């Protein structure tokens, strides 16, 4: 009988616990074993998936026996162990090649799978993502009531994590439900194969009739593909009418999407749209601690000022934060440090990095946009959007004005920063704010406060 995804995660954590005490090479444990996961246990066969081909080769050649022994200790059973990379899984053409459960066998999207390491339990919730997290949890328990759930943010802020967490939570609570995670590129590729007749003769729409939860990532990449968009439009309507659940992610809100049919954008807007903003420092530090634990280290080994420095200087998104952490851990091991990870050591790790050696308080357009958004109780996404309501339009103009005055950027550069706007639009916005500042006390106060905060 197939083992459920939540049980697989628990078993793999037990395996890691054993390996942590038996493998002396801490760097290998943190960078090769921890990122891997147990994909399936079925028919006497265990499949472990690594995050790279290099990891797959090293673990297969040198550590297969010790992993097998740890797995036997955790399960009290003998399994034939296969170690494959994520790329191997994606390239596989049939479900049999990667040990998919017979009930999951399918003619379309054969290489699609949920990542069991992405769960609600290890998603760090803060002010910046609380609404998206709560909405994601809600749809797992109320299928079809909120269609679609549309989550949008800049890259690297946790959208994909939430999609997989939804899928894993649904499968854990009701294994009979069929969950499909795909990207818009996956959908496009499958649609093209279907049109060319390279896929199974089963109708693509008929296949989607069996799906209970459709989780589709990066919907913006359907732009400029009218035929693919039409097929998705029909599938979308069919699933909604059947009370199935659709969750979509994008780098823009529905109103900002370009290159898609209006009727499709309209459908995206009919459910609940929630944004994920750039995490505040407190959330970044908690995410950092979670990543440290996942890498097999104790967060208390890091001095608090070291954690704050890492968070403050790598706040663009979670991927940047994770990359910085990996760099520090590698530097820590290579330097032979066996003591605490201090602020001085962290700075040494970035000694040759210009981005981390910039002057304190150095402004960027992103910082200005963030501060203006906070001042007017808006989101950064709203300021960057095309919405022209009075408050949002004024806040956008102020952000452009401050970017011009405090950073001395050209109107063309500012236009590019604000989503490709024409330089004349930026000029008009700056002139509008300048004129208001001469006669409007509220504008004078706003500019004075914002400039003070940005120069601090």
Image: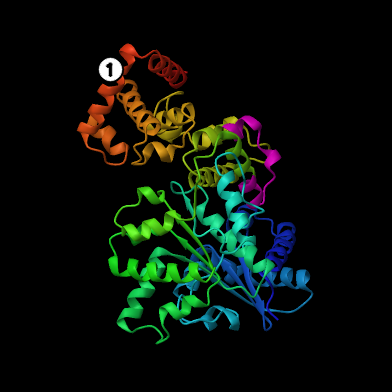
Magenta region, main secondary structure: helix
- Mark 1 Cα-neighbour bin, 10 Å: few <14, some 14–19, many ≥20: few
Q: Residue at x 58, y 41 (%)?
A: 335
Magenta stretch holds residue 270: no
Res. 230 image quadrant: bottom left
Across and down, in percent, residue 245 comes to 54, 65
The residue lying at 53 percent from left, 50 percent from top is 158
Q: Nearer the viewer, residue 368 or 75?
A: 368
Residue 448 drawn above or below residue 281:
above
- Taking the spot 33% from the left edge, 41% from the top edge, the residue there is 386
**Residue 336 visible at all:** no
**Can you give x and y, in whole percent of width and height, for residue 22 in the image?**
73, 60
Q: Nearer the viewer, residue 55 or 168?
A: 168
* Residue 305 on the magenta segment: yes
Residues drawn in magenta = 290-308
Q: Judge from the rendering whether residue 395 lies leftward or rightward of residue 323; answer left or right.
A: left
Q: Give the position of the N terminus as an image quadrant.
A: bottom right
The quadrant holding residue 218 is bottom left
Residue 202 visible to the viewer: yes
- Seen in the picture, residue 420 relative to 399 is either above or below; the reply is below
Q: Nearer the viewer, residue 88 or 133?
A: 133
**Residue drawn at 62 percent across, 33 percent down:** 342
The residue where tag 1 is placed is 435
In the image, is 303 to the left or to the right of 146?
right
Q: SS at mark 1?
A: helix
The picture places residue 214, in percent across and down from the top left corner, at: 51, 67
Residue 35: x and y in percent read 59, 59
């Amino acid at each position: 009988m197939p083992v459920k995804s939540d049980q697989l995660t628990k078993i793999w954590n037990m395996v890691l616990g054993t390996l942590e005490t038996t493998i002396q090479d801490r760097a290998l444990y943190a960078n090769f074993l921890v990122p891997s996961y147990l994909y399936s246990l079925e028919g006497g066969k265990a499949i472990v998936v690594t995050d790279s081909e290099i990891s797959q080769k090293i673990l297969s050649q040198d550590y297969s026996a010790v992993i097998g022994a740890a797995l036997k200790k955790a399960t009290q059973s003998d399994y034939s162990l296969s170690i494959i990379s994520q790329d191997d899984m994606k390239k596989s053409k049939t479900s049999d090649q990667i040990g998919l459960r017979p009930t999951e066998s399918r003619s379309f999207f054969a290489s699609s799978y949920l990542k069991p390491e992405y769960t609600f339990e290890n998603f760090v919730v803060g002010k910046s993502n609380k609404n998206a997290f709560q909405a994601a949890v809600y749809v797992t328990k109320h299928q079809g009531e909120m269609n679609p759930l549309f989550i949008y943010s800049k890259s690297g802020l946790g959208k994909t994590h939430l999609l997989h967490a939804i899928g894993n939570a649904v499968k854990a609570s009701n294994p009979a439900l069929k969950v499909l995670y795909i990207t818009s590129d996956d959908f496009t590729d499958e649609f093209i194969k279907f049109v060319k007749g390279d896929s199974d003769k089963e109708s693509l729409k008929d296949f989607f009739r069996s799906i209970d939860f459709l989780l589709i990532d990066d919907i913006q990449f359907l732009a400029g593909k009218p035929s693919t968009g039409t097929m998705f439009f029909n599938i979308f309507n069919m699933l909604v009418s059947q009370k199935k659940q659709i969750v979509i992610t994008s780098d823009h809100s529905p109103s900002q999407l370009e290159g898609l049919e209006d009727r499709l954008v309209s459908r995206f807007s009919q459910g609940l749209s929630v944004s994920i903003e750039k995490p505040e420092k407190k959330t970044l530090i908690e995410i950092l601690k979670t990543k440290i634990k996942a890498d097999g280290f104790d967060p208390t080994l890091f001095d608090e000022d070291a954690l704050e420095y890492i968070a403050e200087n790598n706040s663009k998104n979670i991927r940047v934060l994770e990359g910085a952490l990996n760099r520090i851990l590698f530097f820590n091991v290579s330097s032979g440090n066996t003591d605490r990870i201090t602020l001085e050591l962290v700075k040494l790790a970035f000694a040759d990095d210009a981005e981390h050696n910039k002057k304190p308080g150095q402004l960027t357009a992103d910082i200005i946009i963030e501060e203006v958004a906070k001042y007017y109780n808006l989101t950064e996404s709203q300021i960057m959007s095309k919405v022209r309501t009075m408050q949002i339009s004024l806040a956008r103009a102020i952000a452009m004005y401050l970017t011009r005055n405090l950073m001395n950027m050209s109107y063309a550069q500012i236009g590019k920063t604000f989503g490709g706007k024409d330089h004349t639009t930026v000029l008009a916005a700056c002139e509008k704010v300048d004129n208001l500042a001469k006669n409007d006390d509220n504008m004078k106060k706003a500019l004075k406060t914002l400039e003070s905060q940005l120069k601090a």
